[in-house]
Image: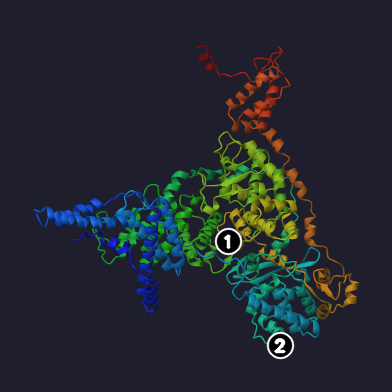
């Protein structure tokens, strides 16, 4: 008899002889898919067995059997004692010899390997799989499963001492999106485009008899090739706006004394920044390239009015088709030209543009500019601060009744959220799954006193989900689902689809939040984050359906739970973005208005609040929930703020939990002012909120920031509508300008010096200057993806892109310039142009082109420079000079709210020791050792000296026991004195 070891062990791990010749012969046969799979699986097990035996030889471990005794006992019990109750010695001896042979074979095969040997085995096995089993995802994962089975068998069948870890399955990483605009045909089509451009330039140089249609054709061609207008919808609006502006030159803005800027407004089907007569419009600010201006001047000289209907495609082909026919190329379409034009203008001399802005010009990324009136107001606004008859009543604006809400229990809420946000949805799913099961049979329910119908059973079970401690958002979700069942407005499968679409995100973002006191701005921001989470993290590209379900849920909550009314823009087929920007001049006037009409620590506090809101883009909830614990490195030159959840607010996404480097984004005056406020108001217990009223130590509430912002902006004469959330738009846009725009554009719109922008660049990006700058901006303001930052918050992306493109050094032959504009060498010489050969540089001719387009004889002073020359920035320091006065005015109120009486008495008692010896002693060492701020301690000691010198009529100290003493006499009540005597 032969001892039968486990079949799986013998089948999988016994050495199998095979030759390469046999394998090649089998490979040539027409194997079925199943046969190939089985063959590759066998080869994998053979390779794993071979690698394992190699490690058994090289790195053998200690042998210790787990199941050998079980096999021996089973063998003797079954083969010897049961068949033969009285076995003889010969039978036992024969069976024992056979067992020894088989056991020796098992011993040699199952030698364990050491930990070092296992790591080497695992490394070799994974390398083999990566090399030969990476045909597709299914094969790759299957190979890893076989490796796991192999290792699991070694752990469970033979070895007891060694437990080999199972390798982690490979992470399914999505392929990284190509950040460049390149395609496989990028170079091929680019070379073809270069041939066309060369032929077009030759045509311009040799012809001067261009018709009106041809002039418009080459104007379109120049806008595509040299202006970067590579979006078809924008190109149509660009051409129409140019032709209209020729007749109404006030539409042009002059920038930098030579370039022209135009606000282009055009209808858009799904995305824009304003509605008019139920139509959606988008507006972009665009710099005009020099070559397009040449053709625009040619068209203007014709005296023609622009046609009402313009077919861009037909006009372009009017001039381009004869050129391509001469080159023997097939018909070039408008879409082909728009797609490949970046090959040319990206590489022009003087152009330095990243691929994100290239995507903006091609229409691949959604973004919007400012409405024309708002943009002009941004440039020319001249706000004026003034002293009012009465200071702002902050307590009234705060509406402190909102503070009656209990603070969020962060520990309890976060735990319940983790448990319930999935369990609740799962419980609702189980209720519907049970009813939808074909085997479902209604049971008698005692409370209902009958066998319920399916709808009645679902409503009964949904009602049972209400329990003590359930959050408002969970009650809303349950009631919303129950309402569908009551009205029978959807079948069960549709209801489950609604639930799966938004329920997890609804619970995740709103659970245990005070949503009953939220404003429409709070809901809008939360829903934006929710939908961005679904799009960026979960990969749902079309979020319209989810937005509509979310709108349905909110409408139900508005009707039945009293939530404020909100319109989710993504739920509409037309998405309108609220493009809001506050200029730096308006921001400075805003701070000055607060300085003039607020006082004390409360006035200092609200200025710090708006400084952080404007410069850092922090959300209102994030600012209101800041504690002194969240301030890092306050005494160093690099203080930062931590945005993290606490009992006053929760953070919705991991991207929102971040460190905000205020030292990088605040000016030096602002940083000093904010740091001084933190030091002055720093309490003994750091767990206290930062933004509280000094007298009551109560939070300022949700209403004060918006109400005060609205009132102060109206007082300084700001005409555009700006909300507190709009300050986040200012932060994102200003960061984009500082990190990505040309120095001239960044300086004029942000009022930052080159040194400030360089410091911001180095602190936020380090030594990197690449695509990750857009990710840095998104991360700074707490966004998951840069796409959302572009779509909602950055309103100068198109302006920055065209500003970079119009920096190009375009040099054309003088003959070409003469054929287009009619200006020869003599006329150019009269206008002061310095020739270098027979070519002209269009960049240096921009002032002349300005005058030609605008019908001016003299150079036009830049309207942006006039705005930049207003000296508001020097006033910045004066706004913050009152912090010492604030400390003096509210000193006692402030100091004794922040420090206990015992801390003050301890400081004075230590100072007494030195003061009695030397009246002019220096107390710096004692102050440094105390827990009181240095400035406040100096104030306390100075005031104590004044009090110590107060005398009675008998020339005795009035408030101290001894003449040279700073500690005051202890004051007792009468009952305390009597107790002290006893």
Q: Answer above or below: position of 45 versus 60.
A: below
Q: Position of residue 519 (x, y in %)?
A: 54, 53
Q: Answer above or below: position of 860 versus 929.
A: below
Picture residue at 72% right of the left edge, 19% below the top: 919
The residue tagged with tag 1: helix, strand or loop?
helix
Can you tell which mark lies on residue 436?
none
Picture residue at 11% right of the left edge, 58% below the top: 83
Q: Position of residue 828 (x, y in %)?
A: 88, 74
918 or 443: nearer the viewer:
918
646 or 82: nearer the viewer:
82
Q: Which residue is mark 1?
A: 788
- Most extreme residue toward the left is 86
Snapshot quadrant of residue 598? top right
Q: Which residue is mark 2?
A: 326
Picture residue at 64% right of the left edge, 85% below the top: 331
Taking the image as drawn, is residue 703 in sight? yes
Crowdedness near tag 1: few (<14), some (14–19) or many (≥20) residues, C-alpha within 10 Å:
many
Nearer to us of marks 1 and 2 is 2
């Amino acid at each position: 008899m032969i001892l039968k070891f486990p079949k799986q062990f013998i089948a999988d791990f016994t050495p199998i002889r095979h030759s390469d010749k046999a394998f090649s012969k089998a490979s040539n046969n027409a194997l079925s898919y199943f046969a190939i799979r089985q063959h590759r699986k066998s080869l994998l097990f053979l390779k794993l067995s071979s690698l394992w035996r190699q490690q058994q030889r090289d790195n053998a471990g200690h042998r210790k059997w787990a199941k050998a005794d079980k096999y021996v006992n089973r063998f003797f019990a079954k083969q010897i004692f049961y068949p033969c109750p009285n076995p003889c010695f010969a039978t036992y001896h024969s069976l024992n010899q056979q067992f020894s042979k088989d056991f020796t074979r098992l011993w040699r095969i199952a030698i364990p390997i050491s930990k070092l040997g296992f790591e080497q085995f695992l490394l070799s096995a994974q390398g083999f799989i990566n090399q030969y089993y990476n045909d597709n995802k299914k094969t790759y994962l299957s190979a890893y499963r076989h490796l796991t089975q192999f290792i699991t068998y070694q752990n469970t069948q033979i070895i007891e001492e060694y437990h080999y870890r199972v390798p982690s399955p490979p992470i399914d990483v999505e392929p990284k999106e190509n950040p460049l605009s390149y395609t496989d045909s990028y170079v091929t089509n680019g070379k073809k485009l270069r041939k066309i451009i060369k032929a077009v330039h030759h045509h311009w140089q040799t012809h001067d008899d261009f018709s009106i249609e041809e002039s418009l054709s080459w104007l379109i061609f120049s806008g595509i090739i040299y202006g970067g207008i590579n979006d078809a919808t924008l190109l149509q609006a660009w051409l129409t706006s140019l032709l209209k502006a020729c007749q109404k030159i006030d539409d042009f803005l002059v920038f930098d004394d030579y370039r022209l800027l135009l606000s282009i407004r055009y209808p858009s089907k799904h995305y824009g920044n304003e509605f008019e007569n139920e139509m959606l419009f988008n507006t972009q600010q665009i710099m005009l390239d020099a070559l397009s201006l040449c053709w625009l001047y040619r068209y203007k000289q014709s005296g023609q009015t622009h046609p009402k209907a313009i077919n861009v495609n037909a006009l372009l082909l009017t001039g381009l088709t004869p050129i391509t026919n001469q080159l023997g190329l097939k018909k070039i379409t408008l879409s082909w030209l728009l797609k490949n034009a970046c090959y040319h203008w990206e590489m022009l001399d003087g152009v330095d543009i990243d691929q994100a802005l290239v995507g903006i010009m091609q229409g691949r990324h959604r973004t919007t500019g400012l409405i024309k009136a708002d943009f002009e107001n941004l440039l020319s606004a001249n706000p004026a601060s003034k002293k009012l008859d009465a200071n702002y009543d902050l307590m009234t604006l705060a509406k402190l009744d909102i503070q009656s809400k209990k603070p969020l229990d962060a520990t309890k809420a976060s735990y319940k959220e983790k448990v319930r946000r999935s369990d609740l949805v799962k419980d609702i799913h189980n209720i519907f799954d049970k009813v939808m099961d074909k085997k479902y049979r209604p049971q008698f329910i005692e409370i209902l006193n009958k066998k319920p119908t399916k709808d009645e059973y679902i409503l009964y079970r949904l009602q049972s989900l209400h329990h003590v401690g359930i959050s408002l958002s969970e009650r809303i979700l349950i009631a919303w689902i129950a309402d569908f069942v009551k009205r029978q407005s959807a079948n069960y499968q549709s209801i489950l689809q609604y639930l799966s679409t938004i329920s997890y995100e609804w619970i995740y973002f709103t659970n245990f939040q005070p949503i009953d006191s939220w404003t429409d701005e709070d809901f809008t921001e939360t829903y934006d984050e929710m939908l961005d989470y679904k799009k960026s993290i979960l990969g749902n590209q079309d979020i319209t359906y989810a937005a509509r379900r979310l709108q349905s849920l909110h409408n139900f909550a508005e009707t039945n739970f009293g939530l404020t009314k909100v319109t989710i823009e993504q739920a509409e087929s037309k998405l309108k973005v609220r493009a809001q920007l506050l200029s730096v001049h308006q921001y400075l006037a805003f701070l000055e208005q607060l300085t003039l009409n607020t006082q004390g620590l409360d006035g200092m506090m609200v200025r710090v609040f708006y400084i952080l809101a404007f410069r850092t883009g922090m959300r209102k909830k994030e600012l209101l929930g800041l504690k002194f614990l969240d301030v890092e490195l306050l005494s160093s030159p690099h203080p930062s703020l931590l945005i993290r959840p606490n009992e006053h607010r929760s953070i919705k996404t991991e991207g929102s939990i971040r460190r905000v480097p205020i030292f990088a984004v605040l000016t030096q005056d602002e940083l000093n002012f904010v740091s001084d406020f933190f030091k002055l108001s720093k309490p003994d217990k750091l767990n206290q909120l930062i933004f509280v009223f000094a007298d009551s130590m109560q939070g300022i509430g949700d209403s004060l920031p918006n109400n005060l912002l609205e009132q102060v902006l109206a007082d300084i004469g700001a005409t555009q509508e700006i909300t507190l959330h709009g300050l986040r738009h200012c932060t994102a846009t200003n960061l984009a300008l500082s990190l990505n725009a040309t120095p001239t554009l960044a300086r004029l719109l942000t009022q930052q010096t080159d040194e400030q922008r360089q410091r911001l660049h180095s602190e936020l990006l380090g030594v990197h200057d690449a695509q990750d700058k857009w990710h840095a901006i998104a991360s700074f303001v707490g966004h998951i993806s840069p796409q959302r930052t572009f779509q909602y918050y950055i309103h100068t992306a198109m302006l920055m892109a065209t500003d970079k493109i119009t920096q190009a050094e375009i040099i054309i032959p003088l003959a070409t310039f003469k054929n287009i504009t009619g200006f020869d060498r003599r006329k150019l010489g009269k206008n002061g142009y310095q020739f270098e050969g027979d070519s002209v540089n269009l960049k240096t001719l921009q002032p002349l082109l300005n005058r030609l387009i605008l019908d001016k004889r003299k150079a036009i002073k830049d309207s942006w420079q006039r705005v930049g020359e207003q000296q508001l920035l020097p006033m910045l320091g004066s706004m913050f000079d009152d912090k010492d006065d604030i400390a003096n005015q509210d000193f006692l109120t402030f100091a004794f709210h922040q420090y206990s009486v015992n801390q003050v008495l301890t400081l004075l008692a230590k100072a007494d020791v030195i003061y009695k010896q030397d009246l002019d002693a220096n107390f710096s060492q004692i102050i440094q050792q105390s827990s009181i701020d240095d400035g406040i301690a100096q104030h306390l000691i100075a005031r104590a000296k004044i009090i110590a010198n107060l005398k009675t009529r008998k020339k005795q100290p009035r408030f101290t026991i001894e003449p040279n003493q700073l500690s005051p006499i202890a004051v007792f009540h009468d009952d305390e004195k009597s107790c002290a005597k006893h």
